[in-house]
Image: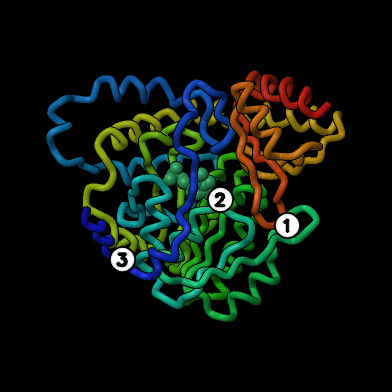
Amino acid sequence: MTAPTPSPSARPDVERLRGYSAPLEGRRGLLRLDFNENTIGPSPAVVEALRAFPADQIAVYPEYDGLREAVIGNLQDSPAGLAHALLPQQVGLFNGVDAAIHAVIHAYGASGDTLLTTSPTFGYYAPCAGMQGMVVEAVPHELPGFRFPLEAMRAALQRGPKILMLCNPNNPTGTRLSAEHVLLLASSAPDTLVVVDELYEAFTGDSVLPHVDFAEHANLLVLRSLAKTAGLAGLRMGFAIGSAEVVDRVCRVSGPYDVNSFAVTAAFAALSDQAYTDHYVAEVLRARNYLVTELTRSGAVFHVDGGNYLLVWPRFSAQQVEQQLRDAGILVRSMAGKPQIDGSLRVSIGTQEQMQRFWECYRKLER
Ligand SMILES: Cc1ncc(COP(=O)(O)O)c(C=O)c1O
């Protein structure tokens, strides 16, 4: 028997990488409160559009005409609107915001450059930086309350990081940042690309988009997705919105057809039924109030701020409670090993009925 031939090594940065680990299997049929997804599905208009998808379009590459304009129209029509008109070339289309994050870091981060962010934050920034050989500088949130570390961030920006990643509201702490502070940070470091991941902004209304003029803040890039509120996580559709120059550089490192035709069709339908998304967001906010009331009444240790999620510290081991919830058909996400929030569980918020089901189960485990 010959010894197996070793496979060739990847780049040293990749060999060293610890990838983003998301449990992707065994979730079907359970109440999924572990990934901050929409828990009821997209607008019926999306389902209808997908059912009517013409077979001949499967055989040809996707076409994106009009989608950037539809994104801009949707932003313009939102209650806060846009202070400055956007051009289609200021909107980049991506296979989810994950792909946009990957592309931004690929386009702007060279080996040895610094990516500045907060800690704890969304777990995909660090592996993307690592792939490029970037150094991650993560500024801790201010305790108590996981407040945004504004002064420490301003000081860190003076050291000239290549990219600043701001997650607003922050996943998983819910930390909020005002548009005024985002613009202040961007103005103080014109050579740093300031990326604001606004995946959960619908739950706070803190978006910087109604306030920014990209001609003045050409170093700012905003990420939006149809995953969490419009319910298209399974189809993957994300947007990067900024100056035409930055959007162009970020799109240069993506494939020409990375966004597929089903996602395009679903995105048009979702964008044209904003009422459905607004309704879902309102339901989640109601359900969050309900759960917060119950948690407060029971004396539980928890933290809630922006976003469709909150953190709860169980009386017994988080690992054990996570497993017991899973046994009862409910998934939540353990924050084990994350700085500041080790020992907590992140619970995504769905509808009031779903949160009642969660609470009935959780409070029994806490007794
Ligand atoms: C802060 C944040 N950004 C980006 C993503 C990924 O978004 P998408 O599904 O659009 O790729 C997530 C998903 O959990 C997230 O929490």
Quadrant the C terminus occupies:
top right
- Residue denoted by label 3: 9
Three-letter amino acid code at disc 2? Answer: Ser
On screen, residue 300 versus residue 33, left or right, reads right
Count residues near mark 3 (Cα–Cα under 10 Å), then give few for <14, some for 14-19, many for 20+. Answer: few
The residue under the point 65% across, 77% down is: 155
| Numbered disc in front, either 3 or 2 | 3
SS at circle 1: loop
The residue under the point 30% across, 58% down is: 251
Pick the residue in front: 266 or 279: 266
SS at circle 2: loop
Pick the residue in front: 316 or 62: 316
| Numbered disc in front, either 3 or 1 | 3
Q: Residue 112: x and y, percent?
A: 45, 77
- Residue denoted by label 2: 207
Three-letter amino acid code at disc 3? Answer: Ser
Q: Residue 161: x and y, percent?
A: 52, 75
- Residue denoted by label 1: 147
Query: Which of the two discs, 3 and 1, labels the residue nearer the N terminus?
Result: 3
Query: Which of the two discs, 2 and 1, labels the residue nearer the N terminus?
Result: 1
Q: Residue 128: x and y, percent?
A: 43, 60
Residue 75 showing in the rendered view: no
Three-letter amino acid code at disc 1? Answer: Arg
